Image: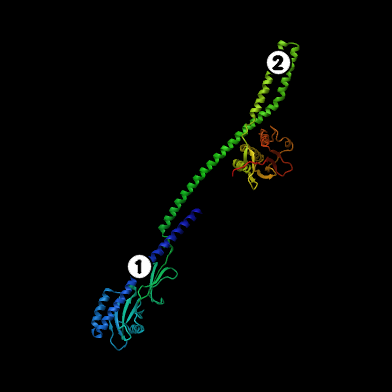
Amino acid sequence: MLWALAVMLALGGVAFFERQNLVRELTIKSETLHRLASQRADQHDAHLTSLSAIFVAGGMERQDLLLDVAATIRRFYPRITSVNVVPYVPSQTAIETQPGLSLQARERVIELARRSTGALQIGPMPDLPDHYLLVKRTPNSDAARHGLALVIDARALIATDDPFWDTPSASLRLSTPDGQTALVGEVSSGETGFSKPLGSASQPLVFETSLTIGLSDLLPVETVVFVIALVTALFLLSAFGLKQRARTKDAEDRAKLSAQETRLAHASRVNAMGEMASGMAHELAQPLTAILSQAQAGRHLARRGEVARLGTVLDDTVSQAQRAANLLDRLRRWSKPNRAPSEACSVHEAAQSVKNLLALEAKTKGAGITLSLYDHPLFIDADPVELEQVVFNLMRNALDASDEAQVTIRTYVDGPSVILDVSDTGPGVSDDLRPRVFEPFVTGKPDGTGLGLALCQRLIEEMGGDIKLLDDTDQTTFRLSLPRSIKTVRP
């Protein structure tokens, strides 16, 4: 569809510019031919002036002079088909060049001559298509008794060698000054055209042209093929470039997410090891204490009896027990993560980041993750990685609860606290596990370590917040309550 739209837009643009070019060419060609026809018409005035002077000077007795000049004019100006002197009185002799005038034409000449008040008169030829009469009274006064007429071929007046006017789409017309009678040619109505009277004062014939623009004129086959090929090539190049850009961006996003996931996984392992060390220390504290007590008791008994035999052994027992206790204490201190300085971090960005990390896993399981976030940004004072780790563990547990689970993260404000709820549509936590769900090594999953929620609780408490599993809810919901940051946050 995009390709088709691009082709249509390109062809539309080409058609628009081609139409503009055709209209401009028609205007230029029309103006050129209009000037030429106007110049030719002006020549007729000069011819009539010369012929009238000769006739007035020689009269009917020297009509040979008039005929000689008329023959010369017709030879050099073939569009003047005949020169005629018609007397007002029909019984008098007329001077005519071949082929002469019909009776109707003579009457028309006399009518035009009598109408004249000094200016030349123009009218269509009664019985000769494509011709018109140009009449001058002679002498040019109220005493005139003759009409001097030129019969002019209108088609020859606008004749041209320009091949532009030979094309079927181009047409032209020459009409009488009132525009009512067409002397020669026809133009198509409603099409692009040109209309202007000739520049001759005596013969202001209306010169009109038109150009019928068809689809083949705007879009020749070779142009259409070229445009389609060009648009296709550009479209393919653009699509390839966009695809490569999308691949590059996708690779960058995957690398960023992978690095973030690796960081979270590393933090989880380190904190899990700390929890494990703490758990081991708790479990070993009582036996080590018993060993210490027994060793002390044995040393006391040895003092009462076999000192040489039991003293060294019991001293070693006490020393090793104390050393074990010191090692476990050191392990406990080592396992406690070195916390980074807290900063104002966005709760919404953490939720969105974890959603991106788990999006592929959720899609694979047919599960869904929905964020229902507060209208305004929410910030807390914490290590961003630790906050993401907590949200990650809760969302991961929710996805592991069942296939096609629907997980929802909701945030809002409750007084000075930021509340983040993680809910899922899984089977929920069994009643016997609920009281101990945050204890280390307590888990409801067959392959679970029981350290995830314990780690979440410790991290949230170190942030100054609280985590709990809500009761009497339709969905399994863990709620984080964290103090809202009062630090200035840059936008």
Residue 189: image x %, image y %? 44, 71
Q: Quadrant of residue 226?
A: bottom left
- Left or right, 60 with respect to 186, comes to left
Check whether the beta carbons of the residues at disc 2 and disc 1 lie within 8 A of each other.
no
The quadrant the C terminus occupies is: top right
Q: Which label was assigned to residue 18?
A: none
Vertical arrangement, residue 5 with respect to residue 82, above or below: above
Residue density around tag 1, few if under 14, some if 14–19, many if 20 or more, within 10 Å: few
Q: Nearer the viewer, residue 207 or 47?
A: 47
- Reading the image, the residue beneath label 2 is 314
Residue 167: image x %, image y %? 37, 66
Q: Quadrant of residue 47?
A: bottom left
Compute the Cα span from label 2 to label 1. Answer: 129 Å
- Left or right, 187 with respect to 368, comes to left
Residue 436: image x %, image y %? 72, 35
- Reading the image, the residue beneath label 1 is 32
- Mark 1 lies on a secondary structure that is helix
- Left or right, 383 with respect to 37, comes to right
Residue 186: image x %, image y %? 40, 72
Specify whether residue 422 is in view.
no
Q: Amino acid at mark 2?
A: Leu
Query: What residue is shown at x 56% (from left), y 37% (from top)?
Result: 259
Query: What residue is shown at x 59% (from left), y 35% (from top)?
Result: 263
In the picture as drawn, the residue positioned furthest to the bottom comes out as: 91
Query: What residue is shown at x 45% (from left), y 51% (from top)?
Result: 234
Q: Amino acid at mark 1?
A: Thr
- Mark 2 lies on a secondary structure that is helix
